[in-house]
Image: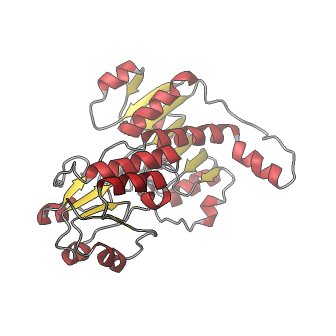
Amino acid sequence: MPKVAVTSRLFAALPEMRAALLAKYPDAKIAERFMRSEDDIIEFLDGYDVAVIGVEKYSKRVLDALPDLKVLACCSAGVDHLDPALMHERGVRMGWIPGVNKHAVSELAMCLMLDLMRHANWANVQMREGTWQAPARGNLLRGRTVGVHGTGNIGKETIKLLQPFGVTILGSDRADCSEFYEQYDVTAVSQEELWAESEVISIHLPRNSTTIGLYSADAIDQLRPGMFLVNTARGSIVDEAALLEKLNDGSITGAGFDVFHEEPVNNAELTSHPNFIALPHMGASARESWVAMAEAGMRGIVENVIPEPGVYPFD
């Protein structure tokens, strides 16, 4: 039986998943706090051959200090915190299930779209401050042209949720999604066409070498004037300074982000902007999603592969 240690906080937060893990691996060690430093990780995992992990980074120093570690079983939806070349070189295997939090993140993306259009969060703040004031204006999502940039697991779920709203849906992805697009009446477009034509864009791209900085100042200049931008993917994809400039001049009517270049975010000018909704990377923060992520980590203990640089999910 493998020696299992858990650095993911999910098992400390979910008693039923702790019990399920210990029923299979009675000697498993479960962290009660977040592993904030490499020293913490090294000390906690010393002598263990399987780690069930969250979003901790496993650097060369960490893997060099843990020669017994052979499997990283991921509870996370993304794996951009892991180095496939480093793991491949050392024969460290990765357990990972894609799309594990797709329902939670797609629902939050819809929440941000609707809130931006109807100013519900703004109105709630006014009420809390003792002011009874309806927004001076609002917009319907219905009838809009919505661009979904990245139509993997989460993007596809977002498209499914958009179906009752009577919107025109544009999809942009490097993969061939033609069968799915035909089923859900999605028009395939280039990213440039998506930027130019969409009244609302919801970003669902992974963070990799092709997407970091993709929404640069030049790209943001190509967005349709007056559009709404939602990002529940990764913060490094969008140039936040360029976004703020466009919010200030009204070129972007509103934006809602759950992810930021630096987290916790330290950009009060952006997060306090009246036309911006800022959330603290809470896309997966639904109990049902946490359970699914913990279950994925448990499966990864036995279902795993040696990752290949440049091969999905790495690029």
Establish if 169 lies above or below 314: above
The residue lying toward the viewer, choosing from 225 and 39, is 39
The residue lying toward the viewer, choosing from 125 and 12, is 12
Q: Position of residue 186 (x, y in %)?
A: 41, 24
Query: Is any atom of residue 226 visible in this view?
Result: no
State the colouring used for the structure image. Answer: secondary structure
Residue drawn at 18 percent across, 54 percent down: 307
Q: Is residue 37 left or right of residue 134?
A: left
Establish if 289 lies above or below 93: above
Residue drawn at 75 percent across, 37 percent down: 137
Residue drawn at 27 percent across, 71 percent down: 59
Query: Is any atom of residue 59 visible in this view?
Result: yes
The residue lying toward the viewer, choosing from 69 and 76, is 69
Establish if 42 lies above or below 254: below
Q: Is residue 64 left or right of residue 174?
A: left
Q: Quadrant of the N terminus?
A: bottom left
Q: Is residue 268 left or right of residue 237?
A: right
Q: Position of residue 56 (x, y in %)?
A: 36, 66
Q: Position of residue 283 (x, y in %)?
A: 50, 49
Q: Quadrant of residue 74?
A: bottom left
Residue drawn at 30 percent across, 24 percent down: 178
The residue lying toward the viewer, choosing from 107 and 269, is 107
Q: Quadrant of residue 31?
A: bottom left
Q: Position of residue 206 (x, y in %)?
A: 35, 49
Counting every numbered tag in the picture gives 0
